[in-house]
Image: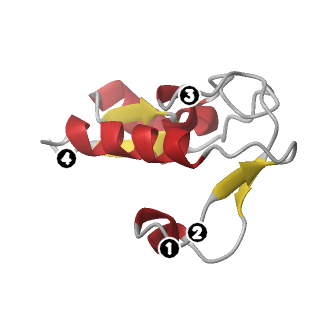
Amino acid sequence: MIKVLISACLLGERVRYDGKQVAIDSPILDQWQKEGRIIPFCAEVAGGLTVPRPPAEIQTGDGNDVLMGKAKIFNYEQVEVTLNFISGSKQVIQLFD
C-alpha cells in the first residue's frame, strides 16, 4: 500500500504557527485515512518549534538555498529558525528510510 505524507495541520491537528485548526475536507483524504495510508507530520514541531509560534519565512532564496547554506529562515521576531526547519525535514526523510 502506498503511504501519503501530509502536513498534520491539513488534517486538523493544531500544529499551525497560530494554533488554529485548518483541516481540509476531502473525500480522498477520508478514504486514505480509513485505509491507513496517511502519515501526518509537522516538520516545524518535529524540529522543536512551539505552538503557537511566530510565522517564519525564508529571507532570500528558496528551500534549496536553505539546504545549501545560502539562505536562512527567520521568524517575524527576527529569530533565526533555520536549524529547526532542517531538523524537522531530516526527520521526515527518516520516516522513509
| Disc 2 to disc 4, C-alpha distance | 34 Å
Q: Which residue is mark 3?
A: 45
**Labelled pair 1, 2 in contact (Cβ < 8 Å):** yes
**Labelled pair 2, 4 in contact (Cβ < 8 Å):** no
In the picture, measured across the screen, residue 45 lies left or right of residue 36, that is right
Residues 69 and 11: in front is 69
The quarter of the picture where residue 57 lies is: bottom right
Callout in the foreground (3, 2): 2
**Labelled pair 1, 4 in contact (Cβ < 8 Å):** no
Residue depicted at x 41% and y 70%? 68
Residues 17 and 83: in front is 83
Residue 71: assigned label:
2
| Disc 3 to disc 2, C-alpha distance | 21 Å
Residue 2: assigned label:
4
First in sequence, mark 1 or 4: give its number: 4
75 lies above or below 21: below
Q: Amino acid at mark 3?
A: Val
First in sequence, mark 1 or 2: give its number: 1
Q: Residues within 10 Å of mark 2 (few under 14, many from 20)?
A: some
Q: Which residue is mark 1?
A: 65
Task: State the image coordinates of residue 89 (x, y, percent, origin top left).
Answer: 40, 46
As helix, strand or loop, the secondary structure at mark 2 comes to loop
As helix, strand or loop, the secondary structure at mark 1 comes to helix
Q: Amino acid at mark 1?
A: Asp
